[in-house]
């Protein structure tokens, strides 16, 4: 049997490391400032209003929460599906999942109209509400993943890792389904009225989560000068490619089925043809930047050779993912609900029948970025104080039989 | 003050009071001035309880609703202290200001027929806003009136996402000059209360009163469960449609004459 690769905490004394923490810290402070500003004055200082009630903070929060469950994929593949090659990455995968979820939830909480009442939300559940279920799912996710990481870190608990890994895998599917269902319950809004929302969110989570994972892995290994061999790198890259393609595929199905139903054609025309910013977000952001360009990079051998380009591809997947979530959340609200079929609203004081506009302010964008910074800060901090990262991911350590193709 | 009624709501209300009592005592929880007054908004005289015996509803005859008339809207603003009447919502942009009831004018795409009607919370029997609310702040009374308990609302706006009629508004800034029976708090959500405070004292909603006073008589208020009420008779005779009937929410507000 080949020897196990040791997990060693990063040294974390370099000025680069401290600059990274300082930079992330600055973003976190800025987001707390933004939070204070929004809560002190009230939400009138944001771009959100009574038409677009969920804005930029929710785009970031939903992205992070979706990515969180996807980041756990690598660990799931290793434990639940027993793929040895991914085993060294399982700890980081669990950590990243927790960190992303924490970042996403922070945004959601800080955007509440009355965040100081969170204790009410934590103690009084309306069990009919999918939102309340999500709170249970999020808390459970934290608990299960922490136990899972613990079984991996404690030598004598290793026998339980598989069980914990399977539990975490099932839980994460429930969690993403729950997140997708938040929109699935909003049947009155045309963009969300589709059963395909839940599986679409699951595939999105695979793709976004792995893209974030790959970037974090590349950054932490190159900054600590630890090797990542082609064996593991190409596996991750190819897997990401498959996920990106699956998202494109299910998005295509979503729109095609919508086009087929007469009452959704207006919404489809809005997203696909004449929705201005939302149409651009879809074709340029989601499809081109987040889908086609990364796929070209990942599957063109001459381009895929360059780690830098693959990293860029993963970054594009993230940008495209944000565009996709933006389209779902903001676009879904901007398109008016039909109250009076066959009628045109010619006068209203509440923008009935009109497409709503939304311009995010700096504060709400900073709040969203703050959630990202919290996630990355947690990762950077934890890999220093605990043994999350394998000392080496070089081919000879991970998979002695790997042959460069 | 609030009189216990033998329903689930009592438990919720009890919980609410206990919760507030405890947190206020233990943590020195500071409630905004006026916030404690919410209780009064669903106060009932001691001898009669809110009960499933009634279901309050509105019937709106769009043929009688006069184009350009906004008497119902103004009456609601005066009664509940929102809109033009309350100058403390000035920092909010137009699209951020609260709207409890609005007039819309419709034109039929085929016939060109123009008509106008008031749009407000439809007091759904199966209210999506209540289903999605994580805390239970959105609740339906036994008598069918859908309200927001501003003590419990955390301002997540999920109810606004779920309401098919855009009936709800989020408060984007601190509100002054609140009415005792209609407390309004920054960071919480609000909507038409069907003037629960009037209904509980055998009154009718301010909008209906104003419409009658104008001589239009386009709105009936009454008990949908009482087959002898004017509203029930009128519904039995001439019918009344639900907006977005396809959603099967069994709305308490019905419309006649949309064509
Ligand atoms: S109209 Fe909207 S706010 Fe009123 S009860 Fe129905 S879902 Fe709730
Ligand atoms: S905004 Fe308030 S009433 Fe609406 S769903 Fe959230 S907690 Fe419930």
Image (spheres, coloured by chain):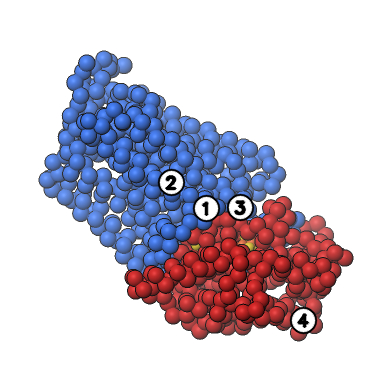
SS class, disc 3:
loop
In the picture, residue A303 is in which quadrant?
top left
Q: Position of residue B144 (x, y in %)?
A: 67, 65
Q: Earlier in the sequence, mark 1 or mark 3?
A: 1
- Do the residues under discs 3 and 4 have CB atoms within 8 angstroms? no
Query: Which quarter of the rendering shows the N terminus of chain A?
Result: top left
Q: Is residue A60 visible?
A: no
The location of residue A232, given as percent across then percent down, is: 29, 26
How many other residues sit within 10 Å of disc 4, few (<14), some (14-19) or many (≥20)? some
Q: Position of residue A316 (x, y in %)?
A: 38, 40
What mark, if any, has residue A137 been given in the picture?
Answer: 2
Q: Residue at x 77, y 58 (%)?
A: B109
User: Which residue is denoted by mark 1 in the rendering?
Assistant: A127
Q: CA distance from mark 1 to mark 3?
A: 23 Å
In terms of secondary structure, where does tag 4 sit?
Answer: helix
Above or below residue A359? Residue B103 is: below
Name the element at disc 2: helix
Report which quarter residue B129 is drawn in: bottom right
Tag shown at residue A189: 3
Q: Which chain is red?
A: B
Q: Is label 2's Cβ within 8 Å of ligand 2?
A: no
The answer to whether residue A139 is left or right of residue A55 is: left
């Amino acid at each position: 049997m080949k020897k196990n690769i040791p997990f060693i905490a990063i040294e974390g004394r370099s000025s680069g490391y401290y600059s990274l923490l300082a930079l992330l810290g600055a973003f976190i402070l800025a987001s707390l400032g933004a939070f204070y500003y929004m809560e002190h004055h009230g939400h009138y200082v944001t771009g959100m209003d009574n038409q677009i009630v969920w804005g930029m903070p929710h785009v970031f929060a939903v992205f992070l929460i979706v990515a969180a469950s996807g980041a756990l994929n690598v660990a799931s593949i290793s434990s639940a599906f027993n793929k040895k090659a991914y085993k060294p990455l399982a700890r980081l995968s669990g950590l990243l999942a927790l960190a992303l979820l924490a970042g996403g939830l922070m945004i959601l909480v800080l955007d509440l109209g009355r965040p100081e009442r969170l204790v009410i939300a934590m103690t009084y559940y309306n069990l009919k509400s999918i939102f309340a279920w999500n709170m249970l799912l999020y808390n459970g996710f934290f608990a299960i993943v922490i136990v899972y990481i613990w079984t991996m870190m404690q030598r004598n608990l290793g026998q339980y890792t598989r069980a914990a890994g399977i539990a975490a895998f099932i839980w994460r599917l429930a969690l993403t389904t729950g997140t997708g269902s938040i929109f699935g319950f909003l049947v009155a809004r045309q963009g969300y009225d589709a059963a395909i929302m839940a599986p679409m969110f699951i595939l999105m989570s695979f793709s976004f989560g792995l893209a974030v994972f790959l970037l974090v892995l590349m950054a932490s290994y190159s900054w600590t000068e630890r090797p990542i061999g082609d064996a593991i790198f190409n596996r991750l890259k190819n897997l990401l490619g498959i996920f990106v393609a699956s998202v494109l595929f299910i998005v295509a199905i979503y729109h095609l089925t919508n086009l087929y139903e007469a009452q959704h054609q207006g919404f489809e025309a809005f997203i696909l043809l004449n929705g201005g910013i939302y149409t651009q977000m879809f074709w340029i952001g989601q499809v081109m930047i987040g889908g086609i360009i990364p796929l070209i990079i990942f599957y063109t051998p001459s381009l895929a050779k360059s780690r830098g380009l693959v990293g860029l591809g993963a970054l594009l997947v993230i940008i495209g993912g944000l565009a996709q979530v933006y389209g779902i959340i903001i676009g879904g609200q901007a398109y008016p609900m039909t109250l009076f079929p066959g009628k045109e609203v010619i006068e209203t004081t509440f923008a009935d029948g009109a497409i709503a506009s939304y311009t995010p302010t700096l504060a709400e964008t900073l709040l969203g970025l703050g959630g990202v910074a919290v996630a990355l800060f947690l990762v950077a901090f934890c890999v220093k104080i605990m043994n999350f990262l394998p000392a080496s991911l070089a081919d000879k350590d991970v998979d002695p039989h790997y042959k460069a193709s | 003050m609030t009189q216990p009624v033998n329903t689930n709501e009592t438990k919720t209300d009890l919980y609410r009071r206990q919760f507030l009592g405890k947190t206020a005592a233990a943590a020195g929880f500071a409630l905004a001035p006026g916030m404690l007054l919410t209780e009064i908004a669903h106060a009932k005289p001691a001898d009669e309880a809110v009960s499933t015996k009634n279901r309050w509803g509105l019937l709106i005859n769009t043929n009688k609703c006069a184009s350009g008339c906004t008497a119902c809207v103004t009456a609601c603003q005066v009664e509940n202290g929102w809109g033009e009447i309350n100058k403390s919502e000035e920092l909010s942009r137009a699209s951020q200001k609260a709207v409890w009831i609005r007039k819309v004018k419709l034109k039929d795409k085929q016939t060109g027929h123009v008509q106008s009607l008031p749009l407000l919370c439809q007091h759904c029997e199966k209210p999506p806003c209540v289903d999605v609310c994580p805390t239970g702040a959105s609740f339906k009374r036994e008598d069918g009136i859908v309200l927001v308990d501003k003590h419990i609302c955390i301002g997540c706006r999920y109810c606004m996402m779920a309401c098919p009629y855009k009936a709800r508004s989020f408060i984007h800034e601190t509100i002054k000059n609140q009415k005792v029976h209609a407390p309004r708090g920054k960071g919480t959500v609000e909507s038409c209360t069907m003037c629960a405070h009037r209904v509980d004292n055998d009154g009718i909603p301010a909008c209906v009163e104003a419409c009658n006073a104008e001589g239009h008589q386009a709105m009936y208020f009454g008990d949908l469960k009482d087959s002898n009420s004017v509203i029930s008779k009128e519904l039995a005779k001439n019918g009344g449609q639900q907006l977005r009937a396809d959603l099967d929410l069994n709305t308490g507000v019905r419309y006649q004459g949309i064509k």
